Image (tube, grey):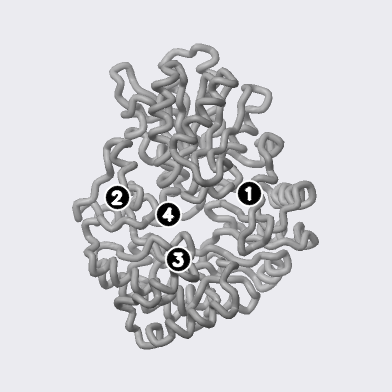
Amino acid sequence: MILLYNPPSSAQRKPILPCSLLALGAVLEGHHAYNIVDANLLGLPATPGDSIELVDRRIRQTDASVLAVTVMPGPQLQDAVPLCAELKRRHPTLTIIWGGYFPSQHWKTALRSQFVDYVVRGHSEMAFLALLDALAADATATEIHAIRGVCARDEHGEPMDGGMPALPKPANLPDWPHHRVDVGAYLRPTFLGSRTIGHHSSYGCPFFCGFCAVVNMVNGAWVPDEADRVAATVRMLVEDHGANAIEFYDNNFFVSEKRVRRFSEQIRDLNITWWGEGRIDTMWKFSDETWQAMADSGLRMVFLGAESGSDETLARMNKGGKQTVAQTLEMAKKMGRYGIVPEYSFVLGNPPNPEADVKSTMAFVRKVKEVNPETEVILYMYTPVPLDGTLFEDAKNSGFAFPETLEGWVSEDWQNFAQRRSTGMPWLGYSIQQQLQDFERVLNAYHPTSTLTHLTPIRRKVLRAVSAWRYKSGMHRWPYELRALHKVMRYRRPETSGF
């Protein structure tokens, strides 16, 4: 028996459909017996010990020999490290396999621990199946090391890189085994709808942004599922399970205009709303007919990486020459005409001049709000990823280095880093941090987010009235009254409440 374990994905343990484990389960069907165990369904209050006891109980009940854990940086890593260490102590013969973004990037660190036996890198459904087949057949270490995408230790206990596996083609993979989970437990209220659920319809992204962890996982590859099949899955979630809103977790859902338009036309009759992630300079080229089709199908918001208010910084991010600040402003206008909300993310504090970068982007955010006040704004601090390129080299030259142990990664400072909330980057001083924190607090009060459904129209008017003088005058410093107001109204999104 193989247990596929999904650690808590947020402090709130939001029940988000474990897409990566369903994708693994799809290729295991008919080959290996497996169960999916999701700590997010434990609810609150919950402690790390609850996760350990949950998985330990399932190991004993099923006599499981393999525990496979999907690990993102942040809360999942925080849970996975003590859980796997303790379960390895209790079950020394248990084979523990890690996959996901964190071990794909930091496989050496994972394998230096004494409780992770193998790492599967990248989109590793087929590599994972090959590893399980090899283990079941008592394959030699040499045979296991030959599996592309599988990292293991050599005879001296040193980590060996198995490389990245080829991206699977979704059209050639089985449908996800939704019957393996309680789909109803993952239907949750969001700003999109009262019964929102997630899906993932493609692998990779064809771009090479200098701050994105996806780049060295896929090297510019993008492999989508067919539009009709994606629409059929959405129809199943709506008609069989009562979903009324869909979140697409693709790295870039909107790469192909033809695919997006076909999908939009196929779901128009479902009367749902949906959300996805795209890129400004790609969607900039979409025809008016495609924009109308997306709007008619219920597209309510698109997450777009605006990233910076400087064309020079965009170039350093490997976006320059493709995406410009002028496009960002025009895209905000265009989406407003179709009633689709642009959700712009910005990465601030970029080296080599983080203070100037913060100031220029804060000024640009105000311009965005002028052309489309409905624009959602998410502000992140720049955090390096291990990529060749200007940004990462600048970071290293400033004294940046990743932890070399899992214990280091789960310290408080590095947990904040993983969620782009670190205050310890060597090129960021307290003054820069404070400027951004104060600006964000004023911005979110004057333009309260539409994603927080508990904010009534009256509360929004109060927030705007109290913050108006600060926003209009640019006096963001020491917004004590807004800090107090937040305690009463909770007007800031969970993603940005770290400031």
* Three-letter amino acid code at the position of disc 4: Phe
Sequence-wise, the earlier of marks 3 and 1 is 1
Q: Is residue 120 visible?
A: no
Give the residue displayed 51% in from the left and 17% down from the top.
135
The residue that disc 1 covers is 199
Mark 4 to mark 3 CA distance (whole Å): 21 Å
Please provide percent x and percent y for residue 425: 25, 56
Mark 1 falls on what kind of element?
Answer: strand
The residue that disc 3 covers is 378
The quadrant of the rendering that contains the N terminus is top right
Sequence-wise, the earlier of marks 2 and 4 is 4
Of residues 319 and 487, which is closer to you in this image? 487
Sequence-wise, the earlier of marks 4 and 3 is 4
Mark 3 falls on what kind of element?
Answer: strand
Of residues 7 and 305, which is closer to you in this image? 7
Q: Is residue 15 visible?
A: yes
The residue that disc 4 covers is 208
The residue that disc 2 covers is 413
